[in-house]
Image (cartoon, rainbow, N blue to C red):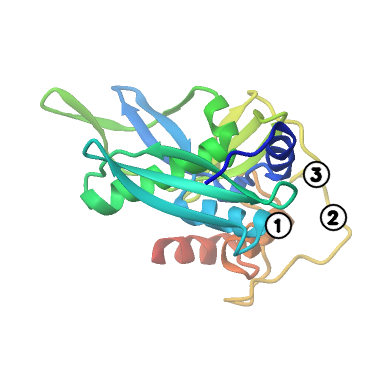
């Protein structure tokens, strides 16, 4: 496959949008006596959706190659200006569950980082959340795995400038960056509009934790395609 000129590369980089908060996942990094550190990541479905959205179904392709015993994934983008394919390639690591599938998926995700998808995740602030832990031998483990969601994120010039993580089991905001995020809306302010209604149970959607009713409804629409109260939202998350 051919290499593009500088103009083609610049054009493609500028077309890739920033990740939305609902596209970012949270996973445990390291557990200590007082809590745990957490990492932000995207999954392969997010990458495929953004590639389709940005370049069209026929504007990109992927190929897996074995080099020196390691699996590499090559993601190629068609540059309409030059008529050439521009490729980015990277290798992956094996997962603890499905060796081959995990390595293929990780290689694809890393190649997509090289293309420019989700590169802002490399600028994530240090995330530490106090949680109950227990010691097993020489290792500290979480007593209960929290159900964490990125519920707010701002990206400026491919750098995360604001971040909010919520424990969806309790509705509590457990991490913010910077420590205080100024956002529109106030959960304690009386509204002059009717409360949204849950599409599942039919009850009015009320405030929960740091969320006002409209924010909870919008979160349900983003993740499940329907307005959900906090109880129904948790049930839907539990089914996943």
Residue matched to label 3: 185
Q: Residue at x 33, y 47 (%)?
A: 65
Horizontal side, residue 161 vs residue 37: left or right: right
Q: Which secondary structure lies at badge 2?
A: loop
For the residues labelled 2 and 3, say whether their Cβ atoms are less than 8 Å apart: no
Residue 131's place in the image compared with 148, above or below, is above
The first of marks 3 and 1 along the sequence is: 3
Mark 2: few/some/many CA within 10 Å (<14, 14-19, 20+): few
Where in the figure is residue 59, as x and y percent of width and height?
Answer: 62, 58
Mark 3: few/some/many CA within 10 Å (<14, 14-19, 20+): few
Q: CA distance from mark 1 to mark 2?
A: 10 Å
Q: CA distance from mark 2 to mark 3?
A: 10 Å
Q: Residue at x 84, y 55 (%)?
A: 191
Residue matched to label 2: 191
Q: Residue at x 48, y 66 (%)?
A: 236
The first of marks 1 and 2 along the sequence is: 2
Horizontal side, residue 41 vs residue 211: left or right: left
Residue matched to label 1: 213
Where in the figure is residue 228, as x and y percent of width and height?
Answer: 61, 66
Q: Nearer the viewer, residue 93 or 79?
A: 79
Q: Nearer the viewer, residue 109 or 207?
A: 109
Q: Nearer the viewer, residue 35 or 203?
A: 35
Q: CA distance from mark 3 to mark 1?
A: 11 Å
The quarter of the picture where the C terminus appears is bottom left
Q: Which secondary structure lies at badge 1?
A: helix
For the residues labelled 1 and 2, say whether their Cβ atoms are less than 8 Å apart: yes
The first of marks 2 and 3 along the sequence is: 3
Which quadrant of the view contains residue 7? top right
Circle 1 or circle 2, nearest the eye:
1
Where in the figure is residue 103, as x and y percent of width and height?
Answer: 30, 46
Mark 1: few/some/many CA within 10 Å (<14, 14-19, 20+): many
């Amino acid at each position: 496959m051919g290499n593009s000129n500088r103009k083609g590369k610049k054009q493609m980089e500028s077309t890739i949008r920033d990740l939305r908060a609902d596209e970012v996942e949270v996973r445990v990094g390291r557990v200590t006596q007082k809590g745990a550190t957490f990492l932000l990541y995207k999954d392969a479905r997010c990458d495929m959706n953004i590639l389709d959205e940005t370049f069209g179904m026929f504007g990109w392709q992927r190929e897996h190659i074995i080099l020196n015993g390691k699996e590499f994934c090559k993601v190629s983008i068609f540059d309409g200006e030059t008529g050439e394919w521009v490729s980015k390639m990277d290798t992956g690591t094996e997962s603890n569950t499905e060796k081959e599938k995990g390595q293929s998926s990780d290689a694809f995700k890393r190649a997509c980082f090289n293309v420019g998808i989700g590169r802002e995740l490399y600028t994530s602030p240090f995330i530490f959340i106090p949680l109950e832990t227990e010691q097993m031998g020489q290792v500290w483990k979480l007593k209960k795995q929290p159900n964490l969601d990125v519920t707010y994120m701002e990206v400026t010039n491919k750098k995360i400038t604001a971040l909010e993580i919520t424990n969806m089991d309790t509705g509590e905001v457990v991490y913010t960056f910077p420590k205080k995020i100024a956002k529109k809306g106030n959960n304690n302010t009386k509204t002059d509009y009717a409360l949204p209604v849950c599409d599942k149970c039919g009850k009015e959607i009320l405030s929960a934790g740091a969320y006002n009713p409209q924010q909870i409804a919008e979160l349900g629409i983003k993740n499940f395609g329907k307005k959900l109260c906090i109880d129904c939202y948790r049930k839907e998350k539990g089914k996943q």
